[in-house]
Amino acid sequence: MAQQIKITAGDVSAQAELNETETARAIWEALPIEGRADTWGDEIYFSIPVKLETEKGQATVELGDLGYWAPGTALCIFFGPTPMSRGDEIRPASPVTVFGRVLGDPTVFKAVADGARVLVERGNRPGDNDKAS
């Protein structure tokens, strides 16, 4: 079963699910992670203490995807178009490793202001009975 995380940014909170990439595993091991939100269009990003190469880089992503941007060692939350987007696509500044996705409505992150505190922590894996492991 997929590992889940909780993302709290300002007054907004959402659950997300990690995929089976090496990047997702490295980020899971680094949790909890705290930072300050930088916004770029409908994207929040912030530097994290994980340094990896791009894994299966994607030039465009889907609504709600979580990406790791290697040039900035940053975690990215995509909830709409960025300044680089063309039409309805969601385009990061450069290819990212998609390592998970927001569960539910990712557009809740539109309410997060630049500079807001962001906390990413382990959520519950099914069957964990509320313990983070």
Image (spheres, grey):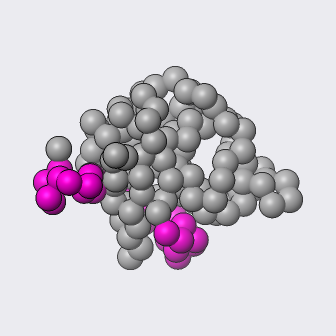
Residue 81 pos. (x, y %)? 72, 60
Determine the residue positioned at 67% across, 36% down: 58
The magenta stretch is 104-132
Q: Is residue 17 left or right of residue 87?
A: left
On screen, residue 57 versus residue 18, left or right, reads right
Q: From where the camera sits, is residue 45 visible? A: no
Q: Is residue 89 above or below residue 47?
A: below
Q: Is residue 62 left or right of residue 28?
A: right
**Residue closest to the far right:** 87
Query: Above or below — where is 86 with respect to 55?
Result: below
Q: State the residue at coordinates (55%, 27%).
A: 55
Q: Is residue 46 above or below residue 6?
A: above
* Res 39 → quadrant: bottom right
Position of residue 102 measured from the top left corner of the image (x, y, whole percent): 48, 59
Rendered location of residue 105, percent (x, y): 53, 71
Which of the two residues, 15 or 83, is positioned nearer the viewer here?
Answer: 15
Lateral position of residue 105 relative to residue 88, left or right: left
| Residue 130 within the segment the image draws in magenta | yes
Using the image as rendered, state which of residue 20 and residue 57 is in the foreground.
20
Q: Nearer the viewer, residue 11 or 100?
A: 100
Residue 43: where, in percent of width, then height?
Answer: 60, 58
Q: Nearer the viewer, residue 28 or 131?
A: 131
Q: Residue at x 34, y 46 (%)?
A: 1
Farthest-out residue, top: 53
Residue 124 colored in magenta in the image: yes
- Asked which quadrant contains residue 98, the reply is top right
Q: Quadrant of the C terminus?
A: top left
Q: Residue at x 36, y 34 (%)?
A: 25
Can residue 26 be spotted in the picture?
yes
Number of numbered callouts drawn = 0
